[in-house]
Image (cartoon, coloured by chain):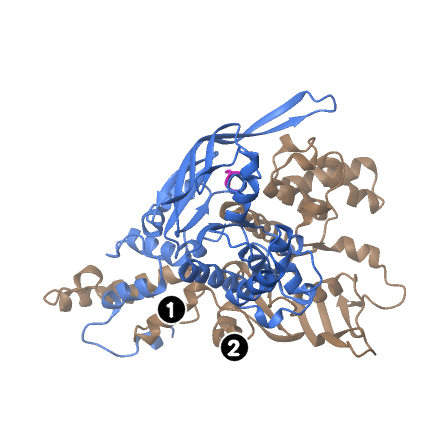
Chain colours: A blue, B brown
Amino acid sequence: MKIIDAAHVFFDYVRRDENDNIEEVSHALSDLSLSIEKGSFVCVLGHNGSGKSTFAKLLNGLNIPREGTVLVAGMDTRQEDKLLQIRETAGMVFQNPDNQIIANVVEEDVGFGPENIGVPTEEIWRRVEASLSAVGMLAYRLKSPNRLSGGQKQRVAIAGVMAMKPACIVLDEPTAMLDPNGRKDVMRTVHELNRREGITIVHITHYMEEAVEADRIIVMDQGRPVMDGTPREIFSRVEELKALSLCVPQVTELAYELRKAGMPISQGILTREELVKELCPLLRASGHEGNTYAKRTR
Amino acid sequence: MSIRCEKLTHIYQQGTVMESYALRDISFEIQDGEFIGLIGHTGSGKSTLIQHLNGLMRPSSGTVYFNGEDIFAQGYDLRKLRGQVGLVFQYPEYQLFEETVLADVKYGPKNMGLSEQEAEERAREALELSGLQPEFYARSPFELSGGQKRRAAIAGVLAMGPQVLILDEPTAGLDPKGRDELLETVSDLHKRRHTTIILVSHSMEDVARYADRIMVLNEGNLQYFDTPRRVFRYFRELEKMGLSAPQITYLMQELRDEGIDVDPSIGTIEEAREEILSLYWSQGGPLAAGADSGTEAGRGLGESSAATGK
């Protein structure tokens, strides 16, 4: 079942002068068509300015296409009377954790969304508790958000979206401002929500490593998808990705370099485990087991 | 010429119940022209430390010497110091404010008391170093892309002619190409101008690739200060501090655990490539791999080529 279905979408940013005359039009999305299966984990990659964020904002009606249609769980984002329902279906998490937290206490922040749409109090508390425990932040429910780390704040923001019971969460570079630990925590959290609760995840990132575990990768360029496939398929196309100002995970790049230098290594290696498994038989000294490392390093 | 910290300690909210050590007894010396990577988890004291290096923050005790002079001594010209030790904050593009890129970059040197003409010369030179194309100089900084804005902001600091350039996570939020280009620009500046660089980063891969030495802060203490290879040898300790080693170091470590003789402290793709290939060829390459019959001959061939290589 498709949860997102975008067909022939065009979206422009229009700049006007003081007299409302059009100064400049930039085509952020041009003829974008793609659909996303319910329950899948999709990563969107692309260089700065490729249209990733513009695309993300289509999915909950923050951006309305100039041409074409976007259906979210069957609802057209152009129908204003459906907008609230669409935003409950597809929740968004943005880059800067500090811009997304509004309350002085964690649990109130998480409860803000459901309260706003008139969910009964009892139910709000149930949702707050369930959401905070889903992101592993229940122990912090009475804390002030200011005292949390960046990664913890992002998890609270995700809990806030969870409390709306979305079918889909769109995350626009949620890890860009976090340290390695915060990044790991956020990634673990969204993968769990995807696996355990079956929530569709659309994750936008510049970190190639974060895309390795996705079901599918979409690469954007000039406002439309130019590559679409599994991580293994996408990360096998090293040169194409580089031409699009992207790169591949470090392990994939090393495997690619070794392959280029003549070692018989499979294409599209994604993880350390895979590379270690392929390298071992190639590097294991057949017959002589001595410590050549010591010798080679003087 | 150097930066030397001596028993630098900074206590937040000293004398209250909230008292906490941001920096504790930090001593080190950075030589002129070094490229230093500064790592540490959020809250480890990185930002506090770099703000002491150009006198934006005063220590609770201890001090900083720049070229042998105590910067916190009475009468020391901190204004001048800030031109010599340039600090690029996180997301520096939020600090752009002028009408054109050129005017923004000129602001620093003009403030230092240089004439209009000198300031403009400095600004143009800095913009060129920053890698921003001349067609953007007359534009409003707000019309530039994220990567371009960041270059303009860095040019603003370069225009002051710093001997030391401190960058606090300069690549956050940039795409992979923008990331690489910016770091190459910094590295180029380091090589061409002999500028001392202090790069604060969350990316172990980046510091492994560029830094001569890595400084690791943990809860306000200077934990390690050594070459990347020596520091990444402590990857288990780094993990306990909420850090990690580069992916490649883990890979080498895992190969080693499998009994493969590779150097486990390697941190970059280039080094790993060399290491693995040299081992592969020294064992006969494709002849030895998987083919029992060709093994002996293959290894013989590989060993002789390895011998001539060393």
Where is residue B35 shown, x and y percent of the image? 60, 60
Mark 2 burial class by Cα count in 10 Å: few <14, some 14-19, many 20+: some
In what element is the residue under mark 1? helix
Residue drawn at (63%, 68%) of the image: A141
Along the polypeptide, which appears first: circle 1 or circle 2?
Answer: 2
Q: Verify CB contact (< 8 Å) between mark 1 and mark 2.
A: no
Q: Position of residue B301 (x, y in %)?
A: 19, 64
Image location (x, y in percent) of residue B194: 63, 54
Q: Toward the viewer: B216 or B195?
A: B216
Q: Taking A260 as reference, is A175 left or right?
A: right
Q: Amino acid at mark 1?
A: Met
Q: Position of residue A138 (x, y in %)?
A: 57, 70
Q: Is residue A147 left or right of residue A178?
A: right
Q: Mark 1: few, some, or many residues within 10 Å (few <14, many ≥20)?
A: many
Q: Is residue B99 above or below residue A183?
A: above
**Which disc is residue A25 wearing?**
none
Mark 1 against mark 2, which lies toward the viewer?
2
Magenta span contains residue B63 = no
Range shown magenta? A49-55
- Give, as a three-letter code, the residue at label 2: Glu
Does residue B50 appear left or right of residue B300 in this picture? right
Q: Is residue A81 above or below residue B53?
A: above
Q: Count how many numbered circles sit on residues in the image.
A: 2
Give the residue at x 76% y 68%.
B65
**Along the viewing direction, whichever of B204 and A285 lies nearer the viewer:** B204
